[in-house]
Image: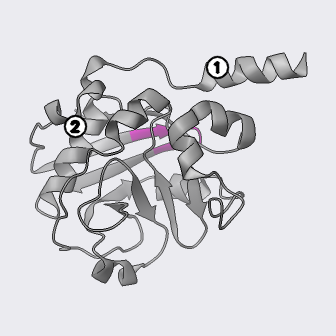
């Protein structure tokens, strides 16, 4: 009975079927407004991001299209390291993740600094930004010279960001947190079964 309940819970919390737009990254190329806000409703409460396109136009455009098309809905904050940053941006549906995993965008010049509350795309090297982003918990200016270009900042609800569950720490294999490869291949089913305390995004939406 316990195994059945766990399976049903995993299926319930898995990402719902998403719009066809997410199946074609190349089609999501709308230019973002010069400044826009994103309301992020999470399992801990709500915070608001303010994005400035002139800070990092390529990143701001990518984030705008992902939010507008529901990419981040039901996504977990899978890497939360106290005093450093919180990372999210792997879709809960492995089929969606597979489509976006190689949908790289070019780097933006770093025009702002990775200060507390600022949000940047994660990278795996030059010109490898896709969908994963992180919010700085602290002043992480050392990241600036590594090419991490902030495109926005938290303008309200930073206390919510600070409260996101961080008990799992760094991801595997360096830590006890989720293994990104398994998050990509198994989605929310893997996270729900093995890391049930992770907080998540209920809905991210462009503010009207």
Residue 42 is covered by the magenta coloring = yes
Principal SS element in the magenta part? strand
* Placement of 117 over or under 67, stated as above or below: below
Compared to 161, does 84 lie above or below? below
* Mark number displayed over residue 84: none
- 73 vs 120, left or right, is right
Q: Earlier in the sequence, mark 2 or mark 1?
A: 1
Q: Which residue is mark 2?
A: 65
* Residue corresponding to mark 1: 11
- Relative to 87, is 206 above or below? above
Q: Point out the stretch of residues depicted in magenta.
A: 40-46
Residue 180 visible to the viewer = yes
Query: Where in the figure is residue 171, as x and y percent of width and height?
Result: 62, 59
- Residue 108 magenta: no
Depth check: 22 or 41 in front?
22
Mark 2 to mark 1: distance in Å?
A: 27 Å
Query: Viewer-proximal residue, 145 or 94?
Result: 94
Instruction: Pick the quarter of the image with the N terminus.
Output: top right
> Which quarter of the rendering shows the C terminus?
top left
Is residue 187 visible in this depiction of the protein? no
Q: Quadrant of residue 107?
A: bottom left
């Amino acid at each position: 009975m316990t195994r059945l309940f766990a399976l049903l819970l995993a299926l319930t919390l898995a990402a719902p079927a998403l719009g066809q737009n997410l199946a074609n990254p190349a089609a999501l190329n709308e230019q973002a407004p010069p400044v826009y806000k994103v309301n992020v409703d999470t399992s801990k409460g709500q915070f608001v991001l303010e994005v400035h396109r002139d800070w990092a136009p390529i990143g701001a455009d990518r984030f705008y299209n992902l939010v507008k098309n529901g990419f981040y809905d039901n996504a977990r904050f899978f890497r939360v390291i106290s005093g450093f940053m919180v990372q999210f941006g792997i879709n809960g549906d492995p089929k969606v993740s597979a489509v976006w995993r190689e949908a790289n965008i070019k780097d933006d010049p770093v025009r702002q600094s990775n200060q507390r509350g600022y949000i940047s795309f994660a990278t795996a090297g030059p010109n490898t930004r896709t969908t994963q982003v992180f919010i700085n918990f602290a002043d992480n200016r050392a990241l600036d010279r590594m090419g991490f270009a902030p495109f926005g900042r938290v303008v309200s609800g930073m206390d919510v960001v600070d409260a996101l569950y961080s008990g799992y720490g760094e991801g595997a294999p360096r830590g006890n947190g989720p293994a990104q490869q398994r998050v990509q291949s198994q989605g929310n089913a893997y996270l729900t079964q093995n890391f049930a305390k992770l907080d998540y995004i209920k809905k991210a939406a462009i503010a009207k």
